[in-house]
Amino acid sequence: MSSNTMETEASVQNGIKRAVFAAIAIVLEVAFILVMNIKFAEQAEWIAIGTRLLAALIVLVIYNDNRPSSLKMSWIIFIMAMPIFGVTLYLLVGLNSHTRAMRERYQKVDERLFPLLPDGEDSIRRLSEQDNRAANIARYVHRASGYPLYEDTAITYYDDAAKGIEAQKRDLARAQKFIFMEYHAIEDAESWHAIQRVLEDRVRAGVDVRVFYDDMGSMGFVNTDFVDRLEAVGIKAKVFNPFMPGLNLFLNNRDHRKVTVIDGLVGYTGGYNLANEYFNITHPFGHWKDTGVRLEGKAVKSLTATFLEMWNAVSDSDVDDVSYRHFLPEPPSAPDAQGFVLPYADSPMDDQMVGEDVYISVAEYAQSYAWFVTPYLIITDEMTHALGLAAKRGVDVRVITPGIPDKKMVYELTRSYYHSLVRNGVRIFEYTPGFCHCKMSVADDVLATCGTINMDYRSLYHHFENGCLYYGSDAVADTKRDFEWMFAQSREVTESYRAPGAGMRLRMLFLRLFSPLM
């Protein structure tokens, strides 16, 4: 690969400069709008009145939206208290401003793609014979997202991102037909360089290699010519939603998915991106804890569909795939297949909150225990109620969050949610060695999830996400053992937040006001 340390440093520096420039541009845009409104308001009172009428109209629209009340209330308070600033901020970042054209592109792709997936009804019937409550979760996911339940799939759980990426590179090196990689963040550094060397080798062997990444997620990691450099060595590359400040842009919806597919036979997903810190090559926030899963068998079809949806719907100027069928082979049953597997994806293009609903369903499913881990805990009243109700039923409900934050403001906001959970019996743990980036759940020794979906508003309502639900396999036991290891590495802070003082309560209330912006 033709890059060196100086080139990489320059790339990252340019990426950071671009992020700073974009942030300054947004600040200047907000300032301009505010100054213009104030200036004209001083000269013409009717403009000020018009602004307040617009604020009232937006408040009514927000009030009648189908989003959770906790999400709506923050925006309503902002706009009513500071109409000019609140309206400006809402138009910039508050809207799920996907346009009709964007929705139509996704709908057209989905109409061609999802009928090629099996309906999974036979698998749901067999699961129902074992556990009807688990089958009902699978039934919901299929109806809400189109992704079916599978059998005949081997699932391997990795308790460390470095283990996952090493297995991933071995599978990439064996690719014969195609490689699809979709990640929120790619860093032009050592971990990616090792992967790219494998990809370049496969390109020379005639393999169709495609890489897709989110512009905002990778902004501080790669330069703007990263796509050109990939294309120059034969790797097809696309950037999701290039970040440009301005009103009514699609900037609030990011691609947070992490998917690798090899020949439609093997697939990977989990919490880790393709950057050094995820594999503890660098340690910006102590020990980085992340996890992932490997699928081999029929369920890989859904991961393939997840990638193809984004690759073909992201831009109306790109040339789409003529046919999807040859990317969706019928894999043989994996010899060590166990239980049931359901890879799924969540999208802000519809009104289905699949990511949140799966977490709530895990809590409602549990009779003995339900454990969750998330890097950010910024949840709706609905999820707070579900976790608390499970604990009140006698279920051992626990949540692990990081002990060392990557974003201090978000960390403080995460802690502001502890009290509302603790008072209902939920136990809270903080992972002391560093930053815990994995997003998982496990319940009653039979059901688990692993994927990209944080327990926060961004993941649950604004981003493109994906996860994997698995039942009745050794991977569930491996997931539970990893939770037990994390508990041993964590400090329990439950009692510290059971009865916070008046000052802490006031601070929590103030922080919660900013939840929709995090």
Image (cartoon, helix red, strand yellow):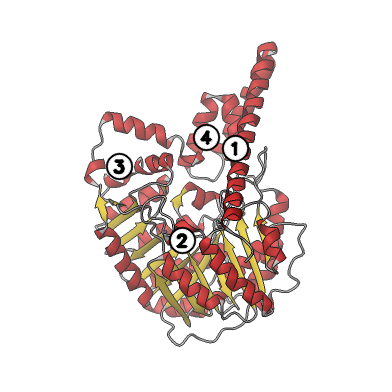
Nearer the camera: disc 1 or disc 3: 1
181 is higher (above) or lower (below) than 34: below
* Amino acid at circle 4: Trp
Label 1: element kind: helix
36 is higher (above) or lower (below) than 305: above
Q: Is residue 165 left or right of residue 132?
A: right
Label 2: element kind: loop
Q: Nearer the viewer, residue 434 or 192?
A: 192
* Amino acid at circle 1: Ala
Residue 304 in sight from this viewpoint = no
| Quadrant in the picture for residue 18 | top right
Give the CA separation, mark 3 to mark 2. Answer: 27 Å
Nearer the camera: disc 3 or disc 2: 2
422 is higher (above) or lower (below) than 47: below
Label 3: element kind: helix
Residue that label 4 marks: 75
Q: Position of residue 154 (x, y in %)?
A: 45, 80
Residue 239 in sight from this viewpoint = yes
Residue that label 2 marks: 271
Give the CA separation, mark 2 to mark 4. Answer: 30 Å
* Amino acid at circle 2: Gly
Give the CA separation, mark 1 to mark 2. Answer: 26 Å
Disc sitting over residue 23 in the figure: 1
Give the CA separation, mark 1 to mark 3. Answer: 33 Å
Q: Position of residue 147 (x, y in %)?
A: 55, 69
Looking at this rendering, what residue extends furthest in the top direction? 43
